Image (cartoon, helix red, strand yellow):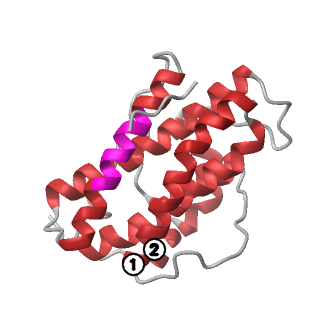
Amino acid sequence: MVSIRLGSAPTKVTRTALLQRAAAGAGAAAGVTVAVLGLPRLAASAPAPSAQQDREILQLALLLEHVQEGFYAEALARLPLQGELRQFARVVHGHEQAHIDAIEAALGGAGRPAPALDLEQATADVDSFRATAAVLEDLVVGAYNGQATNLTPAALGDVARIASVEARHAGWARAIAGEVPAPDAVDPLPDDERVRAELERTGLLKDSP
């Protein structure tokens, strides 16, 4: 169970550009996602919740938390963040560290290690960081919500405590990026394949060796 203890000049990245990165290879990206992330896919029509399925979903959540933690750590070390933007990065980074600890504890020490990240473009400047944060936080909230019905009641109750915080992160990130914090009355519920494909398209993950 999860127990929370709370040579070339960089190119500016916009929110739209981030989502369109590698668009030409989007079809291929979806096909190689499993190889890159090293995680099993859940079936499109997932079986009844089980302890095994809980573990698979927690591994996906752990991957996303590692990506967030590494992203915010790099931004804090590399960029001259100021004011609310720096406060956001510091607070959220601390939360992601706590989420990693909680999920690893739930997995009984069997969590997969942090992936290799490519953060050069995402933290090239303050604007790139701001745009990436909004995209990444939206993606993570969608991932948690999309897997909610695939969890056993015990796992769902604990994971929901993380998901609710991630939702606050997403609203905060959107507000800082000058976007409407809650643009829709109802969010889509992406399956794990869609989550992995969207994560791949952000360009934050390095290719597997």
Q: Quadrant of residue 38?
A: top right
Q: Residue under label 1, please give it.
A: 177
The answer to whether 62 appears left or right of 82 in the picture is: right
Relative to 179, does residue 104 appear above or below in the rendering? above
In the image, what residue type sits under mark 1? Ala
Quadrant that contains the C terminus: top left
Judge the density around disc 1: few (<14), some (14-19), many (≥20) Cα neighbours within 10 Å: some
Q: Is residue 74 magenta?
A: no
Residue shown at the point (59%, 38%) measured from the top left: 159
**Quarter holding residue 42:** top right
Q: Which one is in front, 156 or 134?
A: 156
- Name the amino acid type tagged 2: Arg
Across and down, in percent, residue 172 comes to 42, 69
Residue at image location 49% in from the left, 36% down from the top: 62
Q: Is residue 48 left or right of residue 205?
A: right
Residue 201 in the image, given as x and y percentages of width and height: 51, 60
Task: Identify the image quadrant of residue 178.
Answer: bottom left
Q: Of 43 and 84, which appears nearest the observer?
A: 84
Q: How many marks?
A: 2
- Between 14 and 73, the one lying in front of the other is 73
The segment highlighted magenta reads 91-100
Report the residue at 44% width, 43% height from top: 65
Q: Position of residue 150 (x, y in %)?
A: 76, 38
The percent position of residue 17, horizontal first and vertical second, equals 45, 76
Q: Are marks 1 and 2 in contact (CB under 8 Å)?
A: yes
In what element is the residue under mark 1?
loop
Q: Is residue 200 above or below residue 172?
A: above
Question: Can you identify the residue that label 2 sits on?
Answer: 174
Mark 2 burial class by Cα count in 10 Å: few <14, some 14-19, many 20+: many
